[in-house]
Image (cartoon, rainbow, N blue to C red):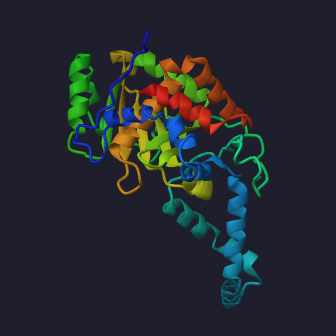
């Protein structure tokens, strides 16, 4: 029996091919676009299939920056009456930390990516970087507090909770969709509580994963997702280009943020979803919708299928047998 599928709505005319048109990627299948097409496309796939240790790259970059500005920093330290750069960093530590936080959206954890088994064409070319260490044990839920985390919008920012509690589900859904009709870069959905509970239970076991996004004429692009639990009644998912996450780590900028509001879940049996897609970040609203559909299938009711469950577990463990080709093959079954 086909599992229940909740509807994700953008309420606007799409500026790029619709999800319906993405269904055409089944013929030829996404996996054929990547591995069965021309050698050029196979080379393109290899760019994101090679996953390196983010921390190794970040350390190299930091050393290069320090070396580049060493002379200026030495001069600044002397002007301040300090002995060396180390003392200068201590004096300006608070200011440096403040500027770092201001310049980027913080992602609480930096997981290791499982190395991906190379294809036969890649087996003769080994990575110059060492393999990443096993993924650390990461606490998923933060300590619950009655005060929402700064910057997190609760459901009361959009609707009068005391009033909507007296309304039937259909009217709540209509109000929720109308609330976001004026925002062309938004997504919204109303999820039945049992469906959401399945998704959240899987998210707590596997808070990090990667998903493929079909790009017409370019094969598939890989995106990194991360679940966070910033407040008792708010759960978010951050989507980031995998290439950017590998380069910038915790300072990478997500292109899409999905927020689940649980404030009325127990009373009305639904969870309200809101998505924000940043313009100019290389992902359209329809493409973000595709990623959310993929997430639903891997984490939701369809996620108990053996292959999807296996891929989630392999990625979480850093299993070297994890293959992007298998992920793409499974994702194409979603349409």
Q: Please state if 32 lies on the left or on the right of 319 as rendered.
A: left
Quadrant position of residue 89: bottom right
Q: Is residue 111 above or below residue 126?
A: above
Q: Nearer the viewer, residue 329 or 235?
A: 329
Q: Residue at x 58, y 48 (%)?
A: 42
Residue at image position (37%, 36%) is 22
The answer to whether one can see residue 172 in this image is yes
In depth, the one of 26 and 223 nearer the eye is 26
Mark yes or no: residue 142 visible: no
**On the rendered image, what quadrant is the C terminus found in?**
top left
Eyeballing the image, is 251 above or below 209?
below
Q: Nearer the viewer, residue 62 or 123?
A: 123
Residue 76 pos. (x, y %)? 66, 87
- Image point 67% across, 49% down: which residue? 51
Location of residue 46 in the rendering, given as x and y in whole percent from the top left corner: 62, 50
Q: Quadrant of the N terminus?
A: top left
| In this rendering, position of residue 137 left or right of residue 237 | right
Figure quadrant of residue 262: top left
Q: Residue at x 30, y 46 (%)?
A: 16
From what the image shows, is residue 264 above or below residue 45?
Answer: above
Residue 108 coordinates in the image, percent (x, y): 59, 46
Picture mark count: 0
């Amino acid at each position: 029996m086909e599992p229940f599928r909740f509807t994700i709505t953008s309420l606007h005319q799409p500026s790029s091919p619709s999800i319906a048109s993405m269904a055409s990627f089944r013929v030829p299948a996404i996996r054929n676009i990547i591995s069965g097409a021309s050698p050029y496309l196979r080379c393109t796939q290899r760019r994101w299939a090679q996953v390196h240790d983010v921390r190794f790259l970040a350390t190299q970059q930091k050393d290069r920056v320090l070396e580049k500005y060493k002379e200026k920093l030495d001069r600044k330290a002397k002007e301040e009456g300090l002995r060396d750069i180390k003392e200068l960093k201590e004096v300006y530590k608070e200011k440096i930390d403040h500027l770092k936080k201001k310049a980027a959206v913080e992602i609480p954890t930096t997981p290791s990516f499982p190395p991906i088994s190379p294809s036969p064409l890649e087996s003769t070319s080994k990575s110059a970087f060492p393999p990443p260490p096993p993924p650390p044990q990461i606490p998923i839920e933060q300590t619950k507090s009655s005060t929402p985390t700064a910057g997190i919008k609760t459901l009361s920012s959009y609707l009068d909770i005391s009033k909507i509690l007296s309304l039937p589900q259909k009217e709540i859904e209509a109000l929720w969709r109308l609330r976001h009709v004026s925002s062309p870069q938004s997504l919204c959905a109303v999820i039945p509580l049992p469906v959401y509970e399945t998704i959240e239970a899987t998210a707590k076991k596997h808070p990090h994963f990667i998903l493929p996004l079909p790009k017409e004429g370019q094969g598939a692009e890989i995106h990194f997702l991360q679940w966070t639990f910033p407040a008792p009644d708010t759960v978010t998912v951050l989507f980031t280009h995998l290439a950017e996450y590998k380069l910038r780590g915790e300072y990478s900028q997500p292109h899409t943020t999905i927020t689940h509001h649980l404030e009325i879940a127990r009373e009305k049996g639904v969870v309200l979803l809101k998505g924000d897609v940043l313009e100019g970040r290389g992902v359209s609203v329809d493409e973000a919708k595709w990623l959310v559909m993929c997430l639903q299938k891997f984490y939701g009711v369809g996620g108990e299928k053996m292959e999807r469950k296996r891929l989630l577990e392999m990625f979480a463990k850093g299993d070297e047998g994890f293959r992007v080709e298998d992920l793409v093959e499974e994702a194409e079954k979603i349409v």
